[in-house]
Image (cartoon, grey):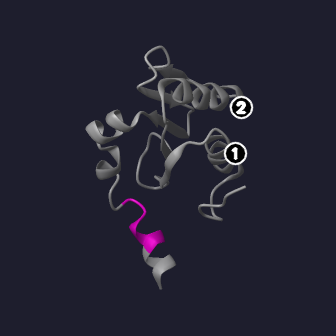
Amino acid sequence: MSELNNNYEKEVQEIIDIMEDKKAQDIKVYDMRGKSPFFDYSILCTGSSSRNIEAIATDIKKSLDNIRNVEGLDEANWVLIDAGDMVISVFSKDARDYYRLDDFYNGVNAEENKEEIE
């Protein structure tokens, strides 16, 4: 079990664990609490193939009770899971490079990263 940050809620850690178990790459968690009125966490990862992306998204979907919507599962290029307080994106490498959501969230965790460096 990996711990990207000890402050994450249990449900976030469970998503991270599923991603790691399915060999997801470049897992990032963006803490949006107090920064977005729509969700608390955005969790991103990259799958190695469309089959891997589908497996990651399917296992995440099975583990959550409060799924509002799932988009992109048929194409398995970018699967977006709306789980209320969490938005989960499972990308292909090309889609992640193209949409650059990591750039969009750049600086969101700046305070946490600053604390970790000190």
**Which residue occupies the foreground of this view, 110 or 76?**
76
Outermost residue to the left: 98
Total labels: the figure holds 2
Q: Nearer the viewer, residue 85 or 46?
A: 46
Q: Nearer the viewer, residue 86 or 116?
A: 116
Please tell me whether residue 111 belongs to the stretch shown in magenta. yes
- Kind of residue sitting beneath label 2: Ser
Q: Which residues are magenta?
A: 108-113
Tell me: residue 2, above or below residue 101.
below
Asked if 114 appears above or below 84 in the picture, the reply is below
Q: Is residue 116 left or right of residue 10?
A: left
Mark 1 element type: helix
Q: Is residue 75 above or below residue 77?
A: above
Q: Position of residue 80 (x, y in %)?
A: 46, 29
Q: Which residue is mark 1?
A: 14
Q: Residue at x 49, y 36 (%)?
A: 47
Q: Is residue 109 magenta?
A: yes
Disc assigned to residue 63: 2
Callout 2: 10 Å neighbours few (<14), some, many (20+)? some
Q: Is residue 27 left or right of residue 13?
A: left
In the rendered structure, are the residues bearing label 2 and label 1 in contact, judged by CB atoms less than 8 Å apart? yes
At mark 2, the secondary structure is helix
Q: Horizontal and vertical percent for residue 5?
A: 60, 63
Chief SS of the magenta region: helix
- Residue placed at 67% from the left, 50% from the top? 13
One can see residue 40 in this view: no
